[in-house]
Amino acid sequence: MNIIFWIVVGIIAGWLAEKIMGRSHGLITNLIVGIIGAVIGGFIAGALGITWGGWIGSTIIATIGAIILLFLLGLVKRRA
């Protein structure tokens, strides 16, 4: 059940980050961005001592991480 949870949260977080950042990606890219964003967001939240659980908290943290990831990828893409 955990893997399904992370897939759903990853897709939602990737989609939300895509809309917030004004990008256009597909489902698989949203999933990848969302899951990597969840790792980034979890690391940052843990370092700041923030603990949010459940679907909503996990989605918020993953979305924030995905936004950070898309922002950093945008910076790298502009330089290349």
Image (tube, grey):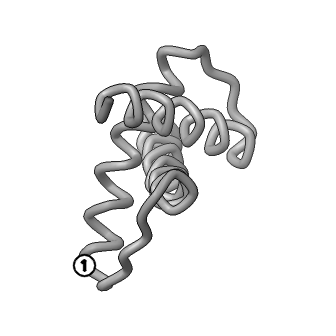
Tag 1's secondary structure? Answer: helix
- Please say if 18 is above or below 68: above
The residue depicted at 38 percent of the width and 26 percent of the height is 4
- Frontmost residue, 70 versus 55: 55
**Residue furthest to the bottom:** 49
Tell me the amino acid under the disc marked 1.
Ala
Q: Is residue 11 above or below residue 28?
A: below
Left or right side of 2 for 67: right
The quarter in which the N terminus is drawn is top left
User: Number of marks in the image?
Assistant: 1
Q: Quadrant of the C terminus?
A: top left
Residue 46 quadrant: bottom left
Q: Which residue is mark 1?
A: 47
Q: Position of residue 24 (x, y in %)?
A: 69, 24
In this rendering, position of residue 13 left or right of residue 37:
right
Residue depicted at 40% across the width and 46% down the height: 37
Q: Residue 42, image x and y in percent?
A: 32, 61
**Rendered location of residue 32, percent (x, y):** 40, 27
Quarter residue 65 falls in: bottom left
Measuring from the top left, give residue 73's x and y in whole percent: 44, 41
Task: Identify the residue shown where x is 72% and y is 48%.
Answer: 20
Label 1 neighbourhood size at 10 Å, few (<14), some (14-19), many (20+)?
few
